[in-house]
Image (spheres, rainbow, N blue to C red):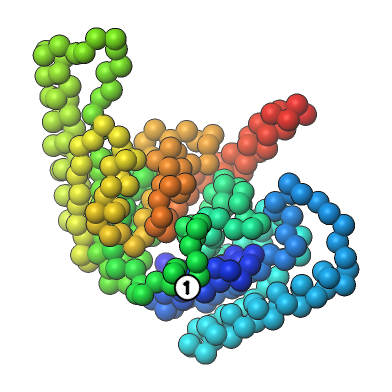
Amino acid sequence: MSKQILVTLDSAKFGEYVLTHAECIARASGATITLLYFFGSSLNKSTSRIVDPLDWQMRKMEAEANLNKMAEGLRTKGLSVSTDIFEGADTEQLIQYAQAKEFDLMILTKQSQNLSNLIHTMIKSATMPIIILPVEGYLPQDTKPTQCYQKFLVPLDGSQRAEISLPVATKLAQDFKAQLVLAHVVQKPAMPRHIPPNAEEVQVVEHLVDINRVDAARYLENLASRLPGDVQTRLIVSDNITAALHHLVDQESVDLIVLSAHGYSGEQQQPYGSVTNNLIAYTMKPVLVVQDLPADTTQEVKVLAIDRSVKARGG
């Protein structure tokens, strides 16, 4: 899948953790790595201050030294690595850079000093798969994985949009000789009302859930039979889809979640659907998001988001 991997960095704090993931993928897929360091980035424009030119130059030299050290560490392990630095880069510049270089995969950290809003913008605008690493609250010495990915979880809702993630997940699973877990959650219909449902109404709901469960089981079995390698299926009936998926992630000791930006009910004017948004925000496992919208649509989404932001500020 990945022949060119872009790794974004804006501090050395989580460098070892991020590079361990990049190294695992590069070794398994034979990909090259580009380390992109954001120096003095304007991606977070909430504050502004006068910059001392001498201090700026000294910090830039330190950043370049750290970046070269990280790159050389990977090269000594036999990997092909290049480096680049963005000074005061914004998200639009990053998007243009990634598209011009034709990267196959981007790796971001969920929380960092300058990239706090970058994930949302990149998923809105980029067409390449993006791995989002959850490093918030972790110390570098605690985050180095002891082994590469061995189990992938692919949440599916039965829609073709959700299945966009399957080719990426399947190829990665083959590269790592990992187990692929296809999961579907049958959601119980909500019945918001002032009085409890009667026996007949409960029976109707149970009948509908049973129909959906049987259909979902058939769907998962059919998909699994057509995919190579070690493929397992998990079918869950729950009142809450995201809660069920979080529980499954922990129960299965998943190493990576792979899913489409949108599912069956996803709104195309939003960069990703509610389930994807929830997993990105709250899971402590890496999440690989595959954008299901075509490039022209993602650009429209970005324009709409900018327009809403301007209106919200009273512009």
Q: Could you tell me residue 34's position as x and y percent? A: 59, 73
Please rate how many residues cluster around mark 1, counting C-alpha atoms within 10 Å: few if below 14, some from 14 to 19, many from 20.
Answer: few
- The local secondary structure at tag 1 comes to helix
Going 63% across and 37% down the picture, which residue do you hit?
A: 305
Q: Does residue 79 appear to the left or right of 187 in the view shown? A: right
**Screen quadrant of the N terminus:** bottom left
Q: x, y percentage for residue 96?
A: 67, 58
* Residue lying at 56% horizontally and 51% vertically, measured from the top left: 119
Q: Position of residue 215 (x, y in %)?
A: 17, 37
Question: Badge 1 is on which residue?
Answer: 141
Instruction: Answer above or below: position of 159 versus 198.
Output: below
How many marks are shown on the rendered structure?
Answer: 1
> Would residue 22 be seen by someone viewing this image from the given angle?
no
Of residue 299 and residue 245, the one placed in the foreground of this image is 245
Question: Considering only vertical position in the picture, is 218 above or below 64?
Answer: above
- Front position in the image: 111 or 293: 111
| The image quarter in which residue 150 lies | bottom left
The percent coordinates of residue 257 (x first, y second) are: 36, 55
Res 133 seen here: yes
> In the visual, does 1 lie left or right of 158?
right
Q: Residue placed at 15% from the left, 11% from the top?
A: 198
Toward the viewer: 313 or 298? 313
Q: Residue at x 52, y 74 (%)?
A: 16
In the displayed structure, does residue 213 sit left or right of residue 242? left
**Quadrant for the C terminus in the image:** top right
Q: Say what amino acid the circle numbered 1 marks.
A: Gln
